[in-house]
Image (cartoon, rainbow, N blue to C red):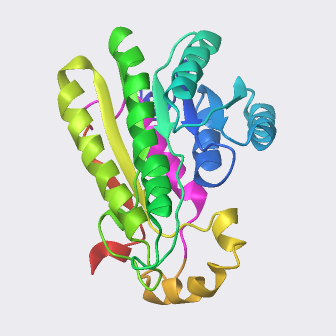
């Protein structure tokens, strides 16, 4: 079997949290294009169902939507159980759900801090460990977490200490789980995107004024495209990355190189 065939995900089954739009939608599309069946997991069920329909029609794969609040243990457990039952197994997952609250530290409320940590970090722990338990009991699997270049640098000019801290913690959670499960055939890796031109970013009134500044600071002079993350995630989900675990793959157009 050649390398291209090995890169395919035929027969693989998985899910993407925060999969209804943005980065999650693009990686879900890439997984299906590579041959996987999967669930689009999101709090917004209506949009998730539309995304699932679009991907299924375009790829011919089994794709369905599941509503889940990833900060609630019972929701995540029910979601993993349903995905594994409907697909007949669970080989990979992309824990991608996240938020960003930009507020100066001296003005940030504790409630804002807690919400950022809850959605970005605590939900990763729940998703990773609940999916991980299934994989540990069924022969293994691959877990992919969405971290951020913000886990490596302090972004400017927007103040986002809670987001930065949560994403740095995601990277260390990823490494910790990878070491714990390295001999048990469950791999855990993260991706750290730079500024990505998702619909949310491009259409956000608060972020639009920052895009020109970000591009001016970027070595490539532009935002990344959501689909530019797809190939990395397909690699991590598949069988050509069996010696890759505990890695954080930065996809930022060299933004963090200086």
Question: In the visual, does 31 lie left or right of 50?
Answer: left
User: Residue 153 versus residue 68: which sits nearer the camera?
Assistant: 68
Quarter of the image for the N terminus: give it.
top left
Locate residue 256, reporting x and y percent: 32, 73
What residue is shown at x 45% (from left), y 48% (from top)? 118
Locate residue 44, reporting x and y percent: 73, 43
Image: 224 above or below 62: below
Q: Is residue 3 visible?
A: no
User: Residue 69 versus residue 4: which sits nearer the camera?
Assistant: 69
Quarter of the image for the C terminus: give it.
bottom left
Q: How many badges with numbers are in the image?
A: 0
Image: 175 above or below 154: above
Whether residue 234 appears in magenta in the rendering, the answer is: yes
Image: 209 above or below 193: below
Query: Which residue in the rendered view is the most extreme toward the front?
Result: 110
Whether residue 182 appears in magenta in the rendering, the answer is: no
Question: In the visual, does 106 lie left or right of 78?
Answer: left
What residue is shown at x 36% (from left), y 73% (from top)? 254
What residue is shown at x 23% (from left), y 25% (from top)? 181
| Highlighted range, magenta | 223-244
Q: Is residue 52 visible?
A: yes
Locate residue 73, reporting x and y percent: 49, 28
- Which quadrant of the structure image shows residue 168? bottom left
Image: 35 above or below 105: above
């Amino acid at each position: 079997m050649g390398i291209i065939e090995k890169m395919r995900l035929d027969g693989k089954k998985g899910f993407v949290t925060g999969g209804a739009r943005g980065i999650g939608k693009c990686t879900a599309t890439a997984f299906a294009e590579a041959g996987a069946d999967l669930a689009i997991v999101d709090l917004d069920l209506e949009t998730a169902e539309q995304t699932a329909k679009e991907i299924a029609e375009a790829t011919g794969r089994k794709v369905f939507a599941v509503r889940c609040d990833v900060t609630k243990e019972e929701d995540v457990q029910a979601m993993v159980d349903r995905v594994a039952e409907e697909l007949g197994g669970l080989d990979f997952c992309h824990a991608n759900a996240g938020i960003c609250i930009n507020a100066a530290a001296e003005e940030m409320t504790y409630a804002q801090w807690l919400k950022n940590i809850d959605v970005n970090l605590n939900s990763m722990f729940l998703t990773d460990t609940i999916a991980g338990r299934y994989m540990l009991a069924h022969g293994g699997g691959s877990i992919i977490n969405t971290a951020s270049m913000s886990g490596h640098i302090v972004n400017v000019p927007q103040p986002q200490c809670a987001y930065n801290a949560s994403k740095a913690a995601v990277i260390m959670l990823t490494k910790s789980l990878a070491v714990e499960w390295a001999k048990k055939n469950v791999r855990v890796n993260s991706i750290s995107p730079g500024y990505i031109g998702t619909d949310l970013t491009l259409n956000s009134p608060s972020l639009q004024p920052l895009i020109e500044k970000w591009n001016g600071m970027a070595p490539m002079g532009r935002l990344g495209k959501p689909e530019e993350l797809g190939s990395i995630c397909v690699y991590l989900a598949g069988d050509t990355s069996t010696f890759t675990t505990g890695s954080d793959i930065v996809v930022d157009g060299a933004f963090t190189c200086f």
